[in-house]
Image (cartoon, grey):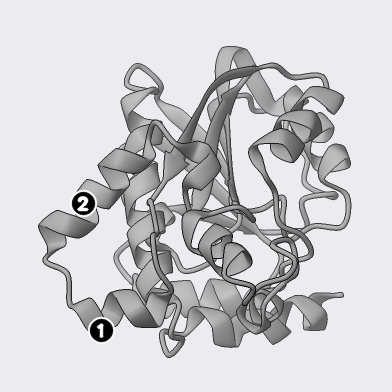
Amino acid sequence: MKNELDLHIKAYQGDNLYDFDNEIILKWYPHRVIKFSEDSTSMLELGLGHGFTADIFSKHFKRYIILDGSSAVIQNFKNNYPDCNAEIVETYFEEFDTEERFDVINLGFILEHIDNPFQILTRFKKFLAPGGKVFVSVPNAEVLNRRLGNLAGLLPDMTVLSENDLLLGHKRYYTVETLTKEIENAGYTVERMEGIYLKPFTTKQILSLNFDKKIIDALCEAAIDYPELSCGMLAQIK
């Protein structure tokens, strides 16, 4: 199983067209999590991925632990962020255990990767401190650019995984409806759901327009109120 996880390391080494989108999304949404967790001091995060979120969260939370099952991804993170003080535990989510309880648990773009989202959502409840917060973020099948592709007849099924999705190890997309159902089936309620990055066109098209950073920031701000149209969805659940 470990070798299978390591196979996805190529997606995190910085030579992918969609690194443009990933950097926008993964540097934006952690600040939204922090905004709604200002009084929290500890976080447990599932998954290292590109390392953007770990770098941000480690500077905010006094106690910060991140779990990842791939030694290759962990080493890639250490190479890119040698000064990061995050505590990294190499483990599968299904096997992790601790007596410690955390103010915040973050499942950032994790549910689309794992075989059994219900199992992980329910299992990690026990690691939450009383009054703690859980944040879940996932990619949106119905993001605006995919909706336009569907209406133009270029994308018959918005839920079909792309070549890039498969490279990243994605197993599914979500919509506002299916994410809400996934969360509620695991015994949570949604306190807040917002969008992450309003992406109107394909990545190649946006890159060709050479947008100023102010426009990209505006697309992130605009997305907050439109999760059903955004590239990703961020849910605060309890």
Residue 40 in which image quadrant: top left
**Which is more N-terminal, label 1 or label 2?**
1
Given the current orientation, which residue lies at the most extreme front position? 152
Identify the element where label 2 is drawn: helix
Given the current orientation, which residue lies at the most extreme top position? 131
Q: Nearer the viewer, mark 2 or mark 1?
A: 1
Report if residue 79 is visible in the image: yes
Q: Nearer the viewer, residue 220 or 125?
A: 220
Q: What distance separates the C-alpha of mark 2 from that of mark 1?
A: 17 Å
Say few, some or many: other residues with alpha carbon within 10 Å of mark 1 (under 14 / 14 to 19 / 20 or more).
few
Determine contact: label 2, label 1, CB under 8 Å: no
Q: Position of residue 57 (x, y in %)?
A: 37, 45
Q: Nearer the viewer, residue 47 or 114?
A: 114
Q: Work out which quarter of the rendered image holds the N terminus and state it.
A: bottom right
Q: Amino acid at mark 1?
A: Ser
According to the picture, the residue beneath numbered tag 2 turns out to be 217
Q: Amino acid at mark 2?
A: Asp
Q: Work out which quarter of the rendered image holds the C terminus and state it.
A: top right
Q: Position of residue 207 (x, y in %)?
A: 28, 80
Q: Answer above or below: position of 171 versus 41.
A: below
Q: Nearer the viewer, residue 23 or 83?
A: 23
Identify the element where label 1 is drawn: helix
Report if residue 59 is visible in the image: no
Q: Which mark is residue 208?
A: 1
Report the residue at 49% width, 46% height from top.
Answer: 229
Residue 31 in which image quadrant: top left
Q: How many marks?
A: 2
Report the residue at 62% width, 77% height from top.
Answer: 154
